[in-house]
Structures are given as structure tokens and as C-alpha cells.
Image: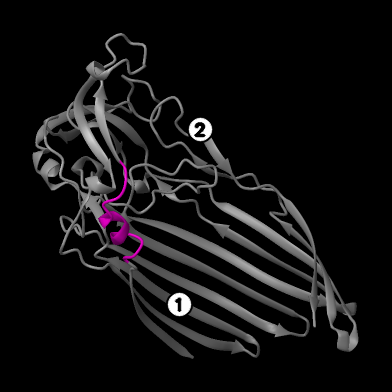
Amino acid sequence: MLKGYYGRFYFNSADEIADRENPVGSVRLRYQFLDPNGNRVLDGPQELGLFRAAQGNTALEVDDNIERPYSQELSGHVEREIVSGLSGRFSYVYKNVRDEWAEIDPTRLAAMTIPFAFVDIGADGVRGTSDDQTLNLVDRPATTPQERVYTNPDNPAYNSDFHTVELALNRRFAGGWMVLTSVGYTWLSQFSDPRTGTGSLNALSHVRDYFWRPNQRLFGDQGKETSTIWNYKIIGRYTFPWDIGFSGSLKVQSGRQWGRNTSVPFPGDGSQPVRVEPITSNRAPSVSILDIRFDKGVSFGRFGKATAMVDVFNALNHGTVVNFSTVTGANFQNVIGILDPRIVRFGVRFEF
């Protein structure tokens, strides 16, 4: 059996453009904090230095010629029966994002021509050791005016591409049992935030984001790098006599790839996050989760059927680290989040 699919989907502008065009909103102005007396308290306007940035609704201009972003998906599948009840499948899925919206500052971008050398102290966090490296960055004059524009960046274009291949075997339910297993591999070509999420529920990753500063696009094709991720899963169910069932799933996924980052104190551009190694330099630990279920059904004839269930999530109680700090310094690789522990759930389902 051959299957194919193509789709094109346009972004909804109501929750993005309309909100940004709305003139009602707060604006925050950010200045350099001089703090001459060192008490870390703003004692008056005399302690404010150079203007840094404006943030808020009315500080951002929306490009009148902005275009609506869109996403496309193209997929093909080949499936064949191997023996009775057992089939194999090969799938390829391609997705992309085009003309995505982002904020840029063309005036400050054009002014970023001042060479600025920065010494990255390396993963050990100690200056003067063998893993130190010098980064050749660029700065701007501190007095460069701000020109924030929300638009479709074209230098380079804010585009993303994703390719996935998958192999699967499916033993259809017959004789009281079934098994489905598959393995997949994905290539993600995208612009990545130089930072990683720090929430306890975040999985370690460089989220897709666009940065107009050239310092934050040091690696890959103008900062658009290709990372990979793979996964394996097996799902099965067996039905015993007396309507007793056992089912389970094992899912194994590779950890996300990541690159170390640091905060660079530019004299003109202020402190900015900069990734100091490619996103493919490291990979977080793989995560495996085993979930199982026991169930027992009781029929009440024409009145329906009740099924008692016991679910065990993360049955092996793995405590894999799923997020940690990637910022150079004393907290580098400090644990932020781990896999949720074993959870047992009791439930009843009634069908009528």
C-alpha cells in the first residue's frame, strides 16, 4: 500500500500582529545602572547612564509589508504485509516553516562593526586553562538609536526544515495479542536560541528562535544549525482468560543536542547571551519510559461493561536528568529537572 500527503497551513495573525499593532500598552525603558555608591539601589535619576532599550507594545513597529508565515508538510508511506497479520512500513515526513515573523533592529545591526574580543573560560569555568578560547565578536556604539521592527527577516531568512524517517512493524490484534514497534530519526535544521529553557518542566533544548545579532549566529549556516534526535517505541497488549488484560509501552528517546553558552558584557550592546560552541557539540542523556497497565472487565449484559484499571507510569522509576544549566560558570550543568518518578493510578471505565 502506498500513501502520500501534502498540506499547507498559514499562521493566524490575530494573536500576533493585532496585539502588536494595538497602541494601548505599557512601555519599559531600560538604562545602564551606574550605582556609584555600590548599594545596588536606585537612589535617583543621577544613577542612570546610557539608554539601552525600550520594551513594550508601542516601542515596536510592525512592517506594513509583513507577509503571513506558512508551514508545509509532505509525507510518503510504503506498507506491505510480510505474513498474515504482520505488516512493515517505511515513512518519510518533511515539514518546514517559511516567512516566519521575528523582531529585528536594522539600525543597530548595521552599526555592529566594532571588533570585540572575548575570552571564553571554557567548560571548567576557570580562566587560564587549556579549554579557554578567544571569540572574535562585534560590538556597536552605545549611542546607536534603536529601531525595533517586527517583520519577515530576510538576511538571513527565518526558515526551518525538518526531515523524519521511520521504520515500523505492526502485528494486528488477533489471538488475544498485538505488538507495534517503530524507530524514527529526525533532522532539525533551524535557528536556535543561544540559551536553553530553565523551567523545571523544560526538556533540555535550544528552542527555535531568531536573533538578528551576528554574535548569536556564530555557528552553522548563519546560525541555522542541523541537530538530530531519534526515538524507539514498542507497544503491546495481551488478553488473558476471564477478560484480564495486560498492556505496556516502552519509549526510548535520545537526549537533545546542546551547546554551551555564556553571557558577554559588550561595552556598547550590553550583556548578551552567546553560544560558544555548536549545538551538535553535546547530547543530553537518553530518556526511557516504561508504562504498564493491568485491567479486568466485568460485563453487565445489556446494562454495559465496567473495566477496572491499574496504570503504572515510569514503572522502572528512572530519574534521568532532562534539564540542566548550559551557561558557563559556577552553575554550569547544575541539574534543573529530572524525569517524574513512578506514578500509580487506579481507575474504572464504564461503557454502555
The CA span between labels 2 and 1 is: 39 Å
Q: Mark 1 is on which residue type?
A: Ser
- Which quarter of the picture shows residue 232? bottom right
Q: Residue at x 13, y 34 (%)?
A: 140
The x, y position of residue 63, in whole percent, is 17, 58
- Sequence order check, earlier mark of 2 and 1: 1
Q: Quadrant of residue 215?
A: top left
Nearer the observer, 119 or 307: 307
User: 311 and 256: which one is in front?
Assistant: 311
Asked if residue 16 lies in the magenta stretch, the reply is yes
Q: Position of residue 30 (x, y in %)?
A: 26, 32
User: Which residue was labeled with disc 2?
Assistant: 334
**Which color scheme does this rendered protein use?**
one colour
Sort mark 2 into few (<14), some (14-19) or many (20+) by Cα contacts within 10 Å: few
In the figure, is residue 81 to the left or right of 197? right
Left or right of 187: which side holds 99? left
Residue 315 in picture, x, y percent from top left: 72, 54
**Bounds of the magenta span?**
13-26
Q: Quadrant of the C terminus?
A: bottom right
Please determine whether, in this image, residue 341 is positioned above or below residue 137.
below
Single out the residue that lies furthest toward the front: 24
- Disc 2 element: loop
**Front of the two marks 2 and 1:** 2
Q: Residue at x 83, y 73 (%)?
A: 307
Q: Is residue 83 magenta?
A: no
Q: Nearer the viewer, residue 273 or 67?
A: 67
- Mark 1, residue position: 91
Question: Is disc 2 in contact with disc 1, using a CB cutoff of under 8 Å?
Answer: no
Against 203, is 230 above or below? below
